[in-house]
């Protein structure tokens, strides 16, 4: 592959049978040449999540500058305030993380295309992150289930309480995101359970913890079906796990993955920072687009900038 800054050679090492690769020989930043950016993007589309060690030179501005080479950026979050309008900071000191399976921000219509996560301060042990491939999960479905999900739609919402999912009685003070602010504006969007990837043409499952219910099914039916499908997504053979060091960067295709931050680092400090690249509205296998039921996320997706 081509060279990045300082004429170093980019190499891609596969980490798992179904997803995950490590990229070496690249120093990320806004000054990367187009050929190297294209190589990173190709590896990302092929392996769904890629990891780069030793990116200690990055600050918030350079992280955002690199991410913008992959596409227009969203704001940091639809509801959570942040010092930098592009960078979302996750800080924890009591073992809290986004410890449930999810795809980022599926409660809005334009689900982010890519997420770029930088490890700022990582614990000496624990605090790993696991990703799952939602394309291979779909591909492995038996024909009767595939026929069902191809026609299925689900309502996603940010009315999700991280704290209630935690077993830590002190979790109210340590949640990864402030829960009152997280749901200060409620969003609901109906997405197809199977979307067609706009770049690869692959079909993937759109699930995760923001799913409130399946359209046309009652709550008991929704829970049973959600559990069945999620268990297929998160089967261990369908996952890859990353043990972080300070300065590591993970980049994933948010249209083809779910992820889970493991909350097992006791009282150590863990800080990561995320930048997201704007995506398009998911399209079902029969060509229908997701539809907004509640909330206006156009400011998050920066639609004025995308259209201009």
Image (cartoon, grey):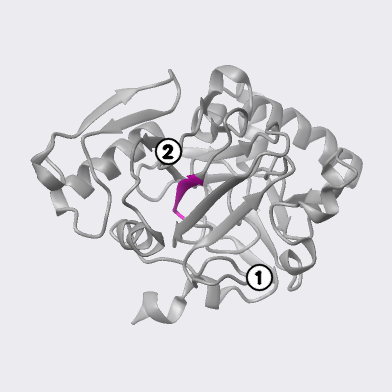
Judge left or right: residue 270 versus residue 114.
right
Q: Which residue is farthest left?
A: 7
- Which quadrant of the structure image shows residue 239? top right
As helix, strand or loop, the secondary structure at mark 2 comes to loop
Q: Position of residue 60 (x, y in %)?
A: 41, 61
Front residue of 184/172: it is 172
Residue 79: give its label: 1
Say few, some or many: other residues with alpha carbon within 10 Å of mark 1 (under 14 / 14 to 19 / 20 or more): some
Residue 122: give its label: none
Q: Most prominent secondary structure in the magenta stretch? A: strand
Q: Position of residue 58 (x, y in %)?
A: 34, 53
Which residues make up the magenta segment?
Answer: 113-120
Marks 1 and 2 sit apart, C-alpha to C-alpha, by 31 Å
Q: Is residue 216 above or below residue 47?
A: below
Does residue 119 belong to the magenta stretch? Answer: yes
User: Looking at the rendering, in which quadrant would you find the N terminus?
Assistant: top left
Judge left or right: residue 256 versus residue 38.
right
Question: Residue at position x 36%, y 66% from top?
Answer: 72
- Which quadrant of the structure image shows residue 155? bottom right
Question: Residue at position x 34%, y 22% from top?
Answer: 14
Q: Position of residue 232 (x, y in %)?
A: 65, 25
- Which quadrant of the structure image shows residue 190? bottom right
Q: Position of residue 31 (x, y in %)?
A: 19, 58
Front residue of 269/8: it is 269
As helix, strand or loop, the secondary structure at mark 1 comes to loop
Question: Residue at position x 66%, y 39% from top?
Answer: 268
User: Looking at the rendering, in which quadrant would you find the C terminus?
Assistant: bottom left
Does residue 13 belong to the magenta stretch? Answer: no
**Residue that numbered label 2 is attached to:** 202
């Amino acid at each position: 592959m081509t060279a990045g800054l300082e004429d170093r050679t980019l190499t891609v090492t596969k980490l798992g049978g179904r997803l995950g690769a490590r990229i070496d020989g690249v120093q990320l930043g806004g000054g990367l040449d187009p050929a190297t950016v294209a190589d990173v993007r190709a590896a990302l589309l092929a392996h769904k999540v890629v990891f780069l060690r030793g990116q200690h030179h990055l600050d918030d501005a350079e992280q955002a500058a690199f991410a913008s080479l992959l596409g227009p950026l969203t704001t940091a979050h639809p509801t959570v305030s942040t010092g930098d309008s592009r960078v979302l900071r996750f800080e924890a000191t009591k073992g809290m993380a986004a410890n449930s399976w999810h795809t980022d921000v599926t409660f809005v219509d334009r689900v982010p295309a890519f997420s770029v996560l930088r490890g700022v301060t990582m614990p000496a042990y624990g605090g790993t992150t696991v990703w799952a491939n939602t394309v291979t999960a779909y591909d492995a479905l038996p024909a009767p289930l595939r026929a069902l999900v191809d026609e299925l739609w689900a309502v996603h919402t940010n009315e999700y309480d991280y704290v209630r999912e935690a077993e830590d009685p002190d979790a109210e003070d340590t949640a990864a995101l402030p829960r009152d602010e997280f749901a200060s504006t409620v969003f609901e969007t109906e997405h197809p359970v199977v979307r067609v990837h706009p770049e690869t043409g692959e079909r993937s499952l759109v699930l995760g913890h923001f799913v409130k219910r399946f359209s046309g099914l009652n709550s008991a039916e929704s829970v049973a079906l959600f559990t069945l499908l999620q268990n297929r997504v998160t089967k261990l053979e369908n996952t890859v796990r990353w043990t972080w060091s300070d300065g590591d960067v993970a980049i994933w295709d948010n249209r083809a993955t779910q992820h889970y931050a493991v909350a097992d680092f006791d009282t150590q400090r863990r800080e990561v920072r995320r930048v997201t690249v704007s995506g398009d509205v998911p399209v079902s296998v029969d060509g229908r687009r997701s539809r907004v039921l509640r909330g206006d996320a156009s400011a998050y997706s920066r639609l004025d900038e995308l259209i201009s």
